[in-house]
Image (cartoon, rainbow, N blue to C red):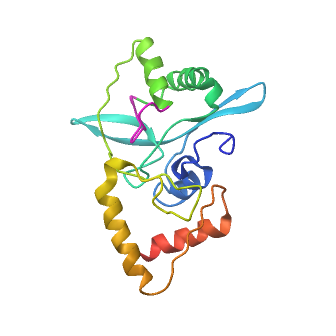
Amino acid sequence: LAAEVPSREPFLQPYWFQAFANTIARGESIPIVVVRNRGRLRGVLPLRRTGRFLRKIPARVLTSLSNVHSCRFDLLCDPQDSQGVARAAWNVLKEQPDWNVIEANAIPEGGVFEAIQRCAEEDGYMTSRWPTLLSPYVMLPSDPSDPFSNCPARYRKDRKRLEKRLERLREYGEPSFEVSNDFDEKRFQDFLKLEASG
């Protein structure tokens, strides 16, 4: 399903959720809402089951399988039927008796989880939205000859800073860039090692 979805965001890929579940959420209950149509996988919503106090009131919370380091979270689904998948996922969630609050962090604007929220509103559930993580990001270019080709104009200051760092890096040799949109186990392990080293 992740390969079929046009967005190749790393934070919506199975390997990210698996790494998160095996480290940050280790030992926690990880319910996963799965939506199928005629046996074909159409949607996946990985969550965490936690208990905590919300405004001094104890609550059983289903929260996104993410945190501030994830930067994005959403219902992974077939874009052709995002509304239907969202409705099916919500129907599963509302039948579960083991939660008081559902919370999803860092949903991108226009994300599919917003459709789940609309379904909850239609069914009379109280909902709320507020901005959380507003981190800038740059889409990777398909042509690696200009690593900044997709840098949005609103991040011009960031681009200038990155260009200066690239120039300093060139003092040690010519850097090269390679863009890969497909999951590669070796690259992923290299990324994990690099992340752990910092």
Q: Residue furthest bottom?
A: 172
Specify whether 39 is left or right of 107: right
Residue sitting at x 55%, y 25%: 86
In this rendering, the answer to whether 75 lies above or below 171 is: above
Residue sitting at x 64%, y 39%: 5
In this rendering, the answer to whether 45 lies above or below 16 is: above
Specify whether 4 is left or right of 147: right
Residue sitting at x 47%, y 54%: 25
Percent coordinates x, y for residue 153 in the rendering: 35, 49
163 and 59: which is toward the camera: 163
| The C terminus: image quadrant | bottom left
Specify whether 5 is left or right of 156: right
How many labels sit on residues? 0
153 and 28: which is toward the camera: 153
61 and 159: which is toward the camera: 159
Percent coordinates x, y for residue 122 in the rendering: 44, 12
Q: Residue furthest left?
A: 56
Taking the magenta stretch, the answer to whether it contains residue 106 is: yes
| The N terminus: image quadrant | top right
Please tell me in which quadrant of the rendered image residue 75 appears: top right
**Magenta: main secondary structure:** loop
Q: Which residues are magenta?
A: 100-111
In this rendering, the answer to whether 29 lies above or below 23 is: above
Taking the magenta stretch, the answer to whether it contains residue 132 is: no
Percent coordinates x, y for residue 128 in the rendering: 32, 26
Residue sitting at x 61%, y 55%: 15
Percent coordinates x, y for residue 149 in the rendering: 48, 56
In this rendering, the answer to whether 11 lies above or below 172 is: above
167 and 37: which is toward the camera: 167
